[in-house]
Structures are given as C-alpha cells and as structure tokens.
Amino acid sequence: MTGSIPYLVIALIKTLLVVAVVMHVLAYLQWVERKVIAHVQLRVGPRRVGPHGLLQPLADVIKLITKEGMIPSHVNKVFYFLAPFLAVVFALIPMSLIPFGGDITVFGVHTSMQVTDVSVGILLVLGLSGMGVYGVALAGWASNNKYSLMGGLRSSAQMISYELPMAMAIAAPLLMLNTLSFRGMVDGQAGFYFGVIPKWIIFQYPFPQVVSFILFIVAGFAETNRVPFDLPEAENELVAGFHTEYSSMQFAAFFMAEYANMMTVSAIATILFLGGWHPLWPAEYGSKFLPSLIFAASGLICFSHGFSPARPFDRITLPVFGVIFLGIAGIFLIPVAQTFLLPIFWFGGKTGAILFVFIWVRATLPRFRYDQLMRFAWTFLFPVAIVNLFITGLLVALS
Amino acid sequence: MDAILFLLFAGVAVLCGINLVLQTHPISSALSLVGVMGALALIYLQLGGEFIAMAQLIVYAGAVMVLFVFVIMLLNEGKERKVHRKLWVRWAGAPLLFAFVAMMSAIVVRILPPSEGVTFGKMTQGTAQAVGTKLFTIYLLPFEVTSVLILIAIIGAIVLASKEVD
C-alpha cells in the first residue's frame, strides 16, 4: 500500500521525465524531417549549426523565443491568444497516457513506465484529440483574415469527417483486445504463436487487423493535418492557412502541437496494432541482443569512415560518435538495464518507424484537392472501416 | 477533497453557463457551452461514471460543439443586436423566472420520493463494460428505438438539404 505523498512524488518524477523526453524528441523530429526530406530530394539539408546540423533545433528554438511576437491590430485578442494555448495543451495531455514499457523496480520502488493508466484511456485520447480542433478553428477565426478563416473551416470539417473512420478503425482491434486501457491492450498482445510469430493485433487470430491498421494511419494523417491532407495550411491557396497571422512562440506552439499529435498517433498505432513494447521475435532467439547489434554496427561504421575521412574534421568527430554508439551497445548488454531499456527500444523503434512513414509520405505525395479529401473519407474510408468492423465482430463472436 | 473538486467543477459549469447567456458574440457563447460540457464531464468522472464522462467529452464537447463553431464560422455571424424591450419586461423578467423555477423545484421535490445523499466513488457500475452490458440486455429496446430515431433524423436531414436551389 503506497501513501498519497510517495505516489505524488513518483508521479511528479515520471511526469518530468516524460516532459523532458517528449520536448527533446519534438525538437529533433523537426531536424529528422528536414534531413529525410532533403535526402529524398537529393539535397543535404541543415548542416551549418553543429555537426550535420545537429544543433539546428536549438538555434531554431532560440530564434523563435527571441523573435518579436507581432499582434495584428484587427484580431480578436482573447481568442487569438487562447487558440495556440488550446492546440498545444490538448496535443500534449495524451502523452501522459501512453505506456512506454512494463512494470519496473527502481531503488526498491515498484512502478510502471507510464505516467498514469486510466481504464478508458483510448476514449480519453479520442476526446482530447477532438478538443484539439478548437485550437486550429479558433486560430483561423480570431485572426480575422480570409485565408485563416478558410484554413480553420477546412480543418474543423476535415477533423470531424476523419474522426469517424478513425474511431471505426480503432473499434475493430478493441473488439479483439476486450479492453479500453492502454496497458491492458499491450498485455493482450504478449506471447507468440508457435513460439515465433508475435501475437500483435496485425497478426492476431481470428482476424489480423491489417486493414484497420492502414485505415488508422490514413485517418491519422488527416487528423494531424499532414501531407497529403494538409489542406488547412495549403500554402499555394491559403498563404499559411490558419496560422498566417501568428509569429514567434505562438507560431511555435502550433508547430509543436502538430508534431506532438504526430507522435501521439504513432504511439497509439504502436500500442493498438504493433504490440507496444513486445519484441518482434522471442528473447530465446536473441531479440534482446538486437539493440546492441544495431548500435555496435553503427559504431563500427563510424570508426571505419573516421579512418578514411571525407573531410578533415571527420577524423575527430566520427570516432567520438563511434565510441558513444559502442557505449550504448554495451549498456544494452547489462541485465539490469535491459529490463527497462529493451521495452523503450522496441516501443521507440516501432513509433519511430511510423513517424518515418509520416515524413516519407510528406516528401513523396502531392496534396489532395478538398473535394477529393472529403469524398475519400465518406465514400471509401468509412464504408471499408464498417465492413472491416462487421467481419471482425463476426469472427470474434464465432471463435 | 471530493467536495472541493466538486465545488470547483460545479462552479466552472455555472460560471460558463452564465457567461453563455451574457456574451453577445455567438463564438464566445459556443465556447462557454464547451466549458459547461467539459465541467459536466469532469463531474460525471468524479461520480464514477467513466464511460459517460468520456462520451460527454467526445460527443458533446468534441463533435457537437465543433459543428456549432463550424456553422457559426461558416455563416460569419457578427455580434447580436440589442432589441429594445419594454421597461417592465426588462425589470420583471428575472424575478418571474426565479419564482417559476422555485415553484417547479418545490413541486418536483414534493412528488419524488426522498433520496439518500450522493456519495463520491460509491457507484461502481460506470465502467464501459457495465454500461455496455446494461445497454444490450435490459435497455436493448430503448437503445434500438433511439438508433432508429436517429436514422430517421439523418434521412430527414438529407431529404431537406437535397432540395434543389434555383
């Protein structure tokens, strides 16, 4: 039995940890996105600030904070200031519900690697993401600018439309998992068929949820206003859409909200469909050595490039990175560290893979037209999601 | 603790409700209504109705109110104009309303059997599972009838909206 004071302290520590990690990932996601898109388009991307532009996010943050916040004279002040606040708050709250790993014991304190587990977790996330629309819609309206208003209108219509197929796509795996709590969902996907095939929802008997996984990801693109569904900020028609009139930190807040929403969608896809922190194959066949192997290989590649450097300073920087990578590989071999590093590795790996798909699609696909976007949601995604839900329900009832 | 939280959420709900009526701009009123819905969801949650709280948040505070805001923004409604009412209407309105509400509540209290007080955390039947079981066994008929009613409403809306514009 834990008293309320220790509980409060543990919750505070976990919250601080999650906030620190999420904020850094948010900043560096931006760097990764610029780098990946640059390489897809045969450019090099940011590389002036720090080695390979690694300090670029820091420079961007300093720039955004020190910039003068311009307030246009024709805006509705209350809602103009409220909008970015709403957007970022409702984008960050869902982070507190996402489990990164199982139960661990640190310094004799038994706790779970999650800020809090609520019994209706997935519904709460859906509700909060629905509330996030107000940020974008109000920003568009309060700016008192026709482009912003169009962006806000498009965004609210789009989010209402895509919430339906998204909820339907979520309902199918929930039928199989029989729970609404994130922890329960991941626990329902533990174990392996025949000792090798993981019991993730996209592989699970009686009906592998591949269709609803794809539906969820597509709807997720629309919910987060990402390419190819970024109509609210279509720059060739609407200047910058709903955030045309924003500058400085208020603009940064919208940016942060978009990236946080992307992370939430990826993390939920991981939890719902890809088995959370459960490895792809059993630990008996060596899945626990995979992180060490990857990091050691990265370290060795750094070393080999460091001995035949393309640029003079690579002789120093690359071996340093090699040593860091080898050190991480070593940490992953320590049995004590494995208990909490392995879940984070698998969870982070899967979430990162989905985030990479988000960026990849942005670099590849053009933007939809607005009528195409609406027709796609109502005449394709929604019926497919309903059929998928019916088949799942039937098979779950029969088995 | 429960009482403090309840007073906090109830206070927010009442303040937002008053603000809803006082504001002259439709968007401000709509957002006050969102505040009322959110505060109600929190009170449901405090009473142990987790599922109802989440449904309130998703359906009312989320979907319904976003549609409201969407329509207000689409029509681009400005501030409402003040209508000059007669003097006695302006002064007698509030007392008459108060008297009416007092009378109605007195009658309701007289008719209904006395109920025991509400205890926080006493209800355990608020989970999604419990609500679902009740909904699909005891209350199956009302549930299905309601869904048919909503279907009729949807079809009616489509028929009304598809009128050709000339």
Image (cartoon, helix red, strand yellow):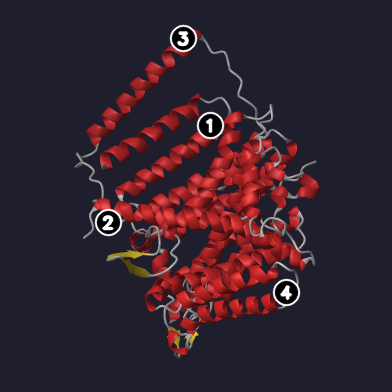
Query: Which residue position holds label 4?
Result: A309
Quarter of the figure with the C terminus of chain A: bottom left
Q: Which residue is labeled 1 in the image?
A: B29
| Horizontal and vertical percent position of residue A53 | 68, 59
The local secondary structure at tag 3 comes to helix
Residue type at tag 2: Thr
Q: CA distance from mark 3 to mark 1?
A: 26 Å
Left or right, A100 with reference to A222 = left
Which tag, 3 or 2, sits closer to the chain's start?
Answer: 3
- Few, some or many residues within 10 Å of mark 1 (<14, 14–19, 20+): many
Amino acid type for the residue under numbered disc 3: Trp
Nearest the eye: A16 or A271: A16
Question: Could you give the CA–CA distance between mark 4 and mark 2, rounded to whole angstroms?
Answer: 67 Å
Q: Are marks 3 and 1 in contact (CB under 8 Å)?
A: no
Q: Which mark is residue B124?
A: 2
Q: Quadrant of the N terminus of chain A?
A: bottom left
Q: Which residue is pictured at 27% across the width and 43% down the height?
A: B2
Q: Chain of mark 1?
A: B
> Crowding at label 3, few (<14), some or many (≥20) Cα neighbours within 10 Å?
few
Q: Give the secondary structure at mark 1.
A: helix
Residue denoted by label 3: B88
**Residue type at mark 4?**
Pro
Q: Earlier in the sequence, mark 3 or mark 1?
A: 1
Query: Is residue A178 among the parts visible in the rendering?
Result: no
Instruction: Kindly state the secondary structure of the residue where label 2 is placed.
Output: loop
The earlier-in-sequence mark between 2 and 1 is 1
- Residue A101, how many percent across, how many down? 42, 69
Q: Based on the displayed image, in which of its 4 quarters is residue A362 positioned?
A: bottom right
